[in-house]
Image (spheres, rainbow, N blue to C red):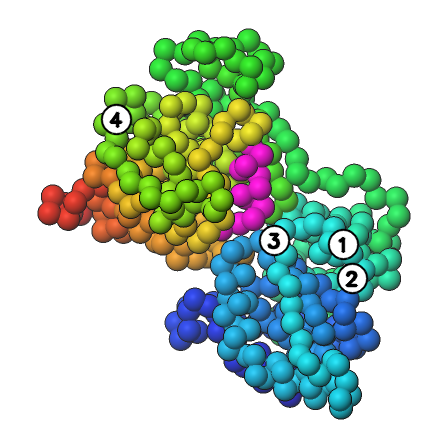
Amino acid sequence: MSPEVDAVLARLLPYPEDGSRADGPVAVDATDRLLLDEAAALIRERPDDVVVVGDRFGALTLGAIASGARHVRTQTDAVTAEAALTANSRRASRLLRDAHVAASAPGSPDAAGPGYTQHDRLEPRLFEGARVVLLQLPTSLAELTEIAEHVARYADPAVTLFAGGRVKHMTHAMNDVLAASFAQVGASLARQKSRLLIAREPRSDVGPLTYPVTARLTDREILDAIAPRGARAVAPGAPTADAPAGTAPDGLTVVAHGAAFAGATLDQGTRFLLAQAPRWPDLSDVQVPPVTCTSDTSEAPATPDRPVPGMDAHPVVVDLGCGTGILAAVLGLRYPHAHVLASDRSRAACDSAAATLAANGVRPAGVVRDDAGALLPIPDGSADLVLLNPPFHDRAALSTDAAHRMFATAGRVLRDGGELWTVFNTALHYRRALERAVGPTEHVAQNPRFTVTRSVRKLLTDMSVTGG
């Protein structure tokens, strides 16, 4: 690795952290370095044809620029990773200019400076003409499949895909996934417990894109949860959107992109939370306080300062960390008079949730890609019910940071007396954190793996925290 690349990587931080926490994430890992080393020669040969997918903190994108790439197209699923790249590009901007000028011929237009373009999602224009693709291997085979199919279908036929990961998290199934889209798949030697899979020669006989996938779920927990009070069941096979008033759908349609958690299935945590639906609040007689909306939201996205119009007329329910939108769709069907909001940091999740809601005839007030609900388009103290199944992994690493940020968001957006229902791995013992962030919290149900709690938002003057 050149001194210029090393200098750039040394400037990066695991944003939003500063890297000082002993058990915190690192901005540059051995896989980033191995990917940049193995691809360096090709990057110099094809400086305009470099694509990065799955960058965590900007090491691959900025490292590729420092290696000689003139303009990098980059896409990452998590909005937090996008923010990290933006922050780190500012930290390393001078070094990136110096590295680029050093690699350019004196007086050439290339010396004007490098750059990158962030793409919002996997799409053809991200990969068109690409000759070098750098990828941090995802843990999900479904996500890897969606990425590999896009590269094989839309990149230059001479493309080389460098996909790297930690050896302990790599499986032979990853080779098989790549081999379905590429005729040549090989592996690098391991270095510092990381290894690369290198794929070439996209197959010309690949079929249609596998993702997104669609499934119809008829689990008993879903059927019970989506039935409004007094509803009767719809005849099997009847589309939800066509169900007459006063009837309950016979199932739920879920749409999932490859990177969406649990795919087009019902994960066990959500299943356990849905089983408690009979105890969720009855919002039919909620007295909604007026909400002032002073701006016209028709020409700008709704934000906490520009809330969704009409919020003063109906209850507000939120699926925080929505994944494929199963809970959001359930909320929309169970509380048809309520405003439904969903948020997730994952682009694949938000796209999946929007499609799931549409497939079930639910028109949400918003599906928002943000960090832990920070940009929910409602004022503080306005939500009546929040459902939460927080993540406890960041890729392959155990992390509860996002969960605690979500607890804080729930405490902020819930009205006095509003409820947060949370399902979590029992070993994580979140009750005290929920009481601090939201209010009095009770254990509602517990099985050998999961716990469901109910937290009631109370003003600080009324709160009494109990042990548990």
Q: Which residue is mark 1?
A: 151
Q: Is residue 388 left or right of residue 394?
A: left
Decide: is 107 above or below 69: below
Label pair 2/3, CB-CB below 8 angstroms? no
Q: Residue 450 in magenta?
A: no
Sooner in the amino-acid sequence: mark 1 or mark 2: 2
Q: Residues within 10 Å of mark 2 (few under 14, many from 20)?
A: many
- Of all residues shown, which one is farthest toward the right? 204
Q: Label 3, label 1: how many angstroms apart (C-alpha)?
A: 16 Å
The picture places residue 74, in percent across and down from the top left corner, at: 65, 62
Q: Which residue sits at x=30%, y=33%?
A: 312
Q: Label 1, label 2: how many angstroms apart (C-alpha)?
A: 8 Å
- Magenta segment's dominant SS is helix
The picture places residue 92, in percent across and down from the top left corner, at: 55, 79
Q: Which residue sits at x=63%, y=57%?
A: 119
The front one of 429 and 96 is 96
Label pair 3/4, CB-CB below 8 angstroms? no
The front one of 373 and 135 is 373
Closest to the camera, between mark 1 and mark 2, is 2
Q: Which residue sits at x=76%, y=73%?
A: 47
Name the image quarter holding residue 217. top right
Sooner in the amino-acid sequence: mark 2 or mark 3: 3
Q: Which residue is mark 3?
A: 120
Q: Residue 351 in magenta?
A: yes
Question: Of helix, strand and loop, which one carries label 4?
Answer: loop
Label pair 1/2, CB-CB below 8 angstroms? yes
Sooner in the amino-acid sequence: mark 2 or mark 4: 2
Q: Which residue is mark 4?
A: 286
